[in-house]
Image: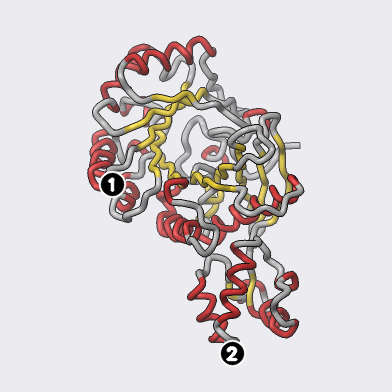
Amino acid sequence: MNIKTKTELLGMGIKELEDFMESIGEPRYRGRQVHMWIYKKAISSFYEMSDLSRDLRNKLDELTRISIPRVLKQRASIDGTRKFLMELEDKKRIESVVIPHSRNKDTRYTLCISTQVGCPIGCAFCATGNSGFQRNLEAYEMIGQVLGSERELQKRLKSNENGLITNVVYMGMGEPMLNYDQVIQSIYTLNDPKGINIGQRHITISTSGDVKGINRLARENLQVTLAISLHACNNELRNTLIPLNRKYPLEELIPSIQEYIRLTNRRVTFEYLLLDGINNSREDANMLIKLLKPLLANINLIPYNKVEGLEFQPPSPPQVNEFYHYLLDGGVNVTLREEKGADIEAACGQLRAGYRK
């Protein structure tokens, strides 16, 4: 059977798998068995599912597929971060990044996943946006990044332990809000306590400011964290850095975030990329304080990570510290991100679907 006509099992919950098994003339409990192999063991080959009969394994192989992406290449940073280049069923390529929480041997990991192949937003400072847009990912392809990364970590660490990845951030390639339905569907699957079981409070969705998506998320009754890629506090500069601002200027974005906070009572994170000579002046800091101090918000300062072919530069460490302490003295909640993976182009703004030789 052509792989395109096979039924995709990845992304199905227990009931869906039970229903599917019944539809092909098998007992419903077989769905629970397959569910365990997919979500607890990250197994994509039916021939490794040892508690299924040989006939059933052959049948499932003929009729279905489990499309956990294949890791083509990986790069390891000196800080323990790993970047995976993954290939999807249609040969499109995406990148995912696993970030260790510490240098301890038994550390857990945060996984940064992609939601699109490329990105249509075209942020001026971002490698992904400058690489063009190809298509949205399906929910199962996002889930597959988690399972594929977990499997690869187990292999590299020579570990049989499950649950190495405890946090997921939708901050990789693409704008999550422009693939909203698939992103939300993947979150419910990742959160399923009978499956991967990643807590909602351990999941973050980042957006460049898609107001329509923010308004929808506010009404989902989810306990995920919302992160806003802000990077500028006036429309003129933000229009240049983030073209989506022309559609949703700050006069629309900030009220939508206020409404999100009102409905969810959840603190919002604002990402602020520090670009030397562009958005790191004392005036910029004052505008940031004025804009965000009234909100239930955290500011996450990120010194710019250089991208080949782009002219932006990061401020010097003393300039970064001065900006950080000025915000702190201004009474806002602010953290200075310890950037990881920059030496392997895995940090904020550096992802693109391929490696240069």
User: Would you name the residue on which mark 2 appears?
Assistant: 25
| Front residue (pair 117, 30) | 30
Label 1 crowding class (10 Å Cα cut-off): few <14, some 14-19, many 20+? Answer: some
* x and y percentages locating residue 123 in the rendered image: 47, 35
- Residue 188 position (above or below residue 217): below
| Front residue (pair 237, 294) | 294
Q: Is residue 149 left or right of residue 114?
A: right
- Residue 219 position (above or below residue 167): below
Q: Earlier in the sequence, mark 2 or mark 1?
A: 2
Give the quadrant of the C terminus.
Answer: top right
Q: Residue at x 42, y 57 (%)?
A: 184
Q: Is residue 97 left or right of residue 301?
A: right
User: Would you name the residue on which mark 1 appears?
Assistant: 264
Q: Residue at x 32, y 55 (%)?
A: 220
* x and y percentages locating residue 154 in the rendered image: 71, 50
**Three-letter amino acid code at disc 2?**
Gly
Q: Quadrant of residue 204 in the image?
A: top left
* x and y percentages locating residue 179 in the rendered image: 44, 54
Q: Is residue 164 visible?
A: yes
Query: SS of the residue at dot 2?
Result: loop
